[in-house]
Amino acid sequence: MRVGVDYYPEHWDEDLWEPHARLMREAGITLARLAEFSWCRLEPRDGIYDFEWLDRALEVLHRHGIQVILGTPTATPPAWLHERYDIYPRDSRRYPLGFGTRLQRCLNHPVMRRYSRRITEAMVSHYANHPAVIGWQTDNEFEANLCYCEVCADLFRQWLQRKYGTLEHLNKAWGTIFWSQEYTSWSQIPLPWVARCGEEHNPSLRLEYRRFASESTVSFQREQVEIIRRLAPHHFVTHNLMGLHDSVDYFALAHDLDFVSWDNYPGGSWTNAGHAELAHDVMRGVKGKNFWVMEQQSGITGWGSVSRRPAPGQIRAWAWQSIAHGADAVVFFRWRSCLYGTEQYWHGILNHDGVARRRYREIARFAEEVNRLSAELDGTTLRHQVAILHSYEQNWALQIQPQVNGLRWWQQVSRYYYSLRGLGVGVDIVPIGADLSHYRLIIAPSWYLMTESDAERLTQFVEGGGTLVLSPRTGVKNELNVCRTEPLPALVRHLAGVEVDDYDPLGDEVNHVRLNTGEEFACSVWADALLLQGAEAIATYTHSIFSGEPAIARHQVGGGTVYTFGTYGEPELYDTLFARILDDVGVQQMAGIPRDVDAQWRVKDGARYLIVVNLANEERTALVPAGASVVLGSVSDGGAVRLPPYDVGIYRVEG
């Protein structure tokens, strides 16, 4: 296991590099990421490369025993390249986006592709055998290439022609007869540009464009990966993903990587703020293996406005939480707060003055712990019996037509995830194509786009003895975002033992359901009136137009069970139902873990390690197994461990 830092030597006078490296080493930092935003220094003029400054920086770090990950610098094309070529992306109104920030490039533009390959090949050739360099990060925080330029329009049409073969096939598949949109030439097909104000393009067109934009990003990265594999096959290749970001299909993007990394800012001005626990598990599921955190919050974050300063101990707690969920390396962003530019107030381990203060000491404590325990924790992984299915295409389809408040993908995943975690259960978040056979319980958020192969995989899982939970809006459309004609939930209605007889988009309006055991709970967002066809009702609506009709059903199929949830309930509904379902399927729950304490098992042959992290600003008490030995933290008192605010404990259980 490793502790690292994101370092930008080009931001500092060269006489500071040596004291920086010395302070890093004294803090226990053994890893640094460099150069992902330095194209203008590495190639100051067209075809003229300057690696001497980076050579000197690597020499300093290597002398202090710090290994290096280099980033390909293609997220920030230099000004001279933009001046010479119009590689700017276009927005949905087809206006060019200008110079002055980052990611201001169309990944499909042939000039961008050519120059990106060229700088990547030059860098990798130069550093392939450098003793400090161990791996590469492609670009930085890829997003889907949602560009609306004519280059992308032409490539999109070619992409569609390869997929559909003929316009007749495409017109029929998309139903372009609607609003007289039938195409008689491939050149007539638009991107989803802004059309009539307030009205949207064909949902099939929009979904295919999202697929194309994502594939464009994957293709751009693949060119870099192929260069690295060819010139430096002994180096690893990774990329820093963004947790719950969803513009690009991370499963496809990660296919070419050795492992994924991601950028974790749990207390900052970031889309994942407050969802680090969930995002860690999403990232682990992208390749079904441990990951790295390539940017871990080290202080106050923000650009124009800023977040609160993490409380004493909170940075260490977040870092240990990363390891608890599967991180094998934690790299803090950044070493020293930048004096200029947009991220002046995105604070590093050191403030602008460069003095080693409180955050430095806290991170040094974490690094000492990780370095001391690395040999024992190396090789540990997470193994769970419960999974939530994840799909970027389902997410995109629900973004295209969100229908009502509360139906968005991450809202659905969060409902299930936090209930299961609150019950003391570890959760994997996996694609439907993963090996599902070792799971006992699988939850499928709205599997809105249902294919024959999806239905077959779910059927095999249930008939093999698994328990499946289905959600509202399952099976509504086919893979082209066209509504199905079968009664819902369409291809899995026989598996579920129900048909949706009617539905009511509740949105924020509250209804209620009553379980067979008598408890009553609020529900909202959506209400499916279920028609039982072999299943049994375990909950009914008590109010509104579906009063007395089934809301949740259970169906025994072969050796397994299917639960169909026809609505979305308050958290207590999920807690009640999942507690019973987990007991039925034999999944053990960790008892005595408060909801604001994150507890995870990392395991390897012969040993299990329970990592408990108090994320609260007050003391908490957690239960650990009898006979557990202390690896880090306080000794248990009869199985109870007292955790001060933001404290961490690690406990080993043999066998």
Image (spheres, helix red, strand yellow):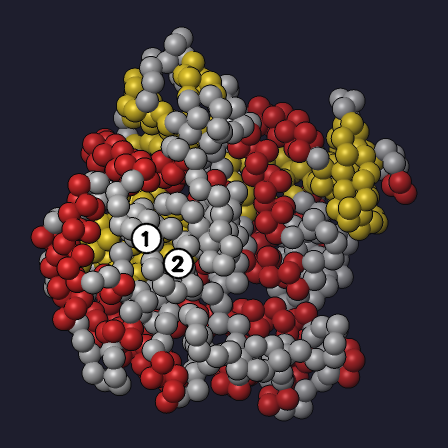
Q: Is residue 641 visible?
A: yes
Kindly report the distance in space between the C-alpha atoms of the residues bearing marks 1 and 2: 9 Å
Quarter of the view holding residue 568: top right
Q: Marks 2 and 1: in contact by CB < 8 Å? A: yes
Give x and y (percent) for residue 203.
68, 69
Quarter of the view holding residue 316: top left
**Residue 221 sits above or below residue 576 on the image:** below
User: In which quadrant of the rendered image does the N terminus lie?
Assistant: top left
Q: Which mark is residue 352?
A: 1
Q: Residue at x 61, y 68 (%)?
A: 207
Circle 2: element type = loop
The first of marks 1 and 2 along the sequence is 2
Q: Most extreme residue toward the top, as rendered?
A: 638
Q: Residue at x 60, y 57 (%)?
A: 394
Q: Residue at x 49, y 24 (%)?
A: 618
Q: Nearer the viewer, residue 436 or 603?
A: 603
Query: Where is mark 2, residue-wise?
Result: 344
